[in-house]
Image (cartoon, grey):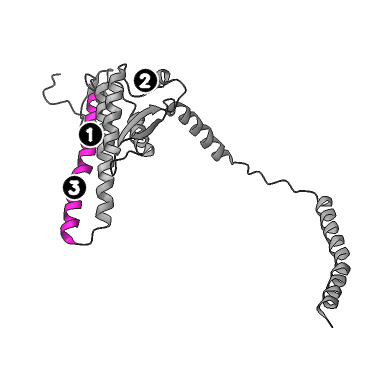
Amino acid sequence: MNQNSTAGARARRGAGHEPRRKRAREDRMTASKATPKVPATVYKPTTQEAAALEAQQARRQKENSAPRVKIEMKAGVAHLSFDHDDQGIAGTLVMEAIGTADFEFVEGLLGHLANVAKQRNAVEAKDLNFLLAVVKGIEPRDQIEAMLAAQMAAVHNATMTFARRLNHVDNIPKQDSAERAFNKLARTFTAQVEALKRYRNAGEQTVRVEHVTVNEGGQAVVGNVTHGGGAASKKPGATS
């Protein structure tokens, strides 16, 4: 048998299979059209989840009122702008979020935070926006609180850096060095929190009543009162 006859036989066999293949394709298409599509199941949150989602939405509307910062690196210099259509309005929103009315203060503070966030001569927007989120989350009421909040963000950033180093040391000297730095930074952050509380509570007087006892006759005695023999004893130095 020559090559031409062999090729002709293959062609005839292929031609015989082609109608069957075509019918199979048509059957599959018909079956797919006839089968109704089952809609995807939509998850329904529980009552607790729905309440958490609603609370989170309200929190995000409050805390995300100030726009994020965008960064463009040019010749090794970070140029900052706000992710907003109007840079003036964006600056006002950021000023409100950090407790100031001075845009130059905002520019300076963002520059300081950018220097803290810089790694390998570059500033990532996500790192800078994290530090800014820490400052906004503290809700500073004036520039003093804003500066303290920025320092707290910087100390936290350094604390996490030395925590990572402490977790990856391979000898005792490096472990001791990282541990000392980590402990100092952690104590500093705690001191900053206490300083912020004292500053915010400056001028506010707190009156603490330890115990109140009303004696017979309606006279109140304020202080630590001891009891003996079933009757309230008089305070030291009290006259009858």
Residue 96: x and y, percent? 37, 20
Circle 2 sits on which residue?
A: 96
Distance from label 3 to label 2 (Cα)?
35 Å
Using the image as rendered, state which of residue 26 and residue 92 is in the foreground: 26
Q: Where's residue 36, x and y in %?
A: 80, 49
Q: Image height check: is 45 above or below 211?
A: below
Q: Name the quadrant of the N terminus.
A: bottom right
Q: Is residue 205 left or right of residue 17?
A: left
- Name which quarter of the figure residue 201 lies in: top left
Amino acid type of the residue that numbered disc 1 sits on in the rendered structure: Gln
For mark 2, give the secondary structure. Answer: helix
Q: Which mark is residue 181?
A: 3
Q: Which residue is mark 1?
A: 192
The secondary structure that most of the magenta stretch takes on is helix
Q: Is residue 215 visible?
A: no
Whichever of callouts 1 and 2 sits on the residue coming sooner in the sequence is 2
- The structure residue drawn at horizontal position 88% and vertical position 63%, both measured from the top left corner, is 19
Q: Are marks 1 and 2 in contact (CB under 8 Å)?
A: no
Is residue 184 or residue 224 the one in the foreground? 184
- What stretch of residues is rendered in magenta? 171-199
Q: Is 32 colored magenta in this rendering?
A: no
Amino acid type, label 3: Ala
